[in-house]
Image (cartoon, rainbow, N blue to C red):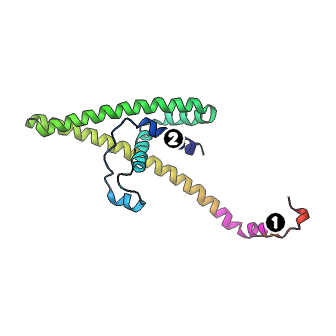
Amino acid sequence: MKKWSMILAAALLAPVVWADQAPPPPPHDKQSTEKSGERPNSPRRQQQMQMRDFFATLSEQERKELRELQDSDPEKAKKFLDERLEKYNKMIREREKRLADLVRTYQSGSKEEKDKAYAEIRKITTEDFERNLKEHKRQLEFLEKRLEREREKYDARQKNAEAIIQARIDELTKPAELRW
């Protein structure tokens, strides 16, 4: 529940935070967006990707602090999130500018400049990929834990199916004067 409230708060703040930004590049995998029913360049898809990328930049300590603040002081949690989003957006703008400069250098520079620019472009791209991969792994681990909990609940209900069915029948067939 805490995680969902954090995600909801971030989703509500996202339109304000990214309003002054140029949209990110379209998703790389057209097939996955077609399967999900969303258009490849839909604003919702872009926003989801931005939020995933933003949360990938938060350290475990920052995530923990945010969860605690959500429970104890939602207003402070909102300020905390605003500060981190502002810092993140500044970092993204600087990174995008740096990347654009490197691409220009690569396209019009000398052989030596091209090699240097290419190496830097590769480094930035690799860092982005590894950060996203790490976030995907974190999400997968969370989902695996949740699946395990759900599996345990299912197994318990399956094991106690007869008692659960009987309790429901007893409730339905109880005389009206004995019901709540």
The residue that appears at 47% across and 29% down in the rendered structure is 83
Q: Main secondary structure of the magenta part?
A: helix
Label 2 sits on what residue type? Leu
Seen at 58% across and 30% down, the residue is 75
Residue beneath disc 2: 12
Taking the spot 35% from the left edge, 32% from the top edge, the residue there is 91
Q: Which residues are magenta?
A: 155-168
Task: Provide the residue designation for mark 1.
Answer: 171
Q: Nearer the viewer, residue 17 or 68?
A: 17
The spot of residue 127 in percent (x, y) is: 31, 40
Q: Residue 134's image quarter?
A: top left
Residue 114: mark = none
Three-letter residue code for mark 1: Glu
User: Which quarter of the image is occupied by the C terminus?
Assistant: bottom right
Q: Is residue 114 magenta?
A: no
For label 1, count other residues whose C-alpha is less than 10 Å away and answer few (under 14), some (14-19) or many (20+): few
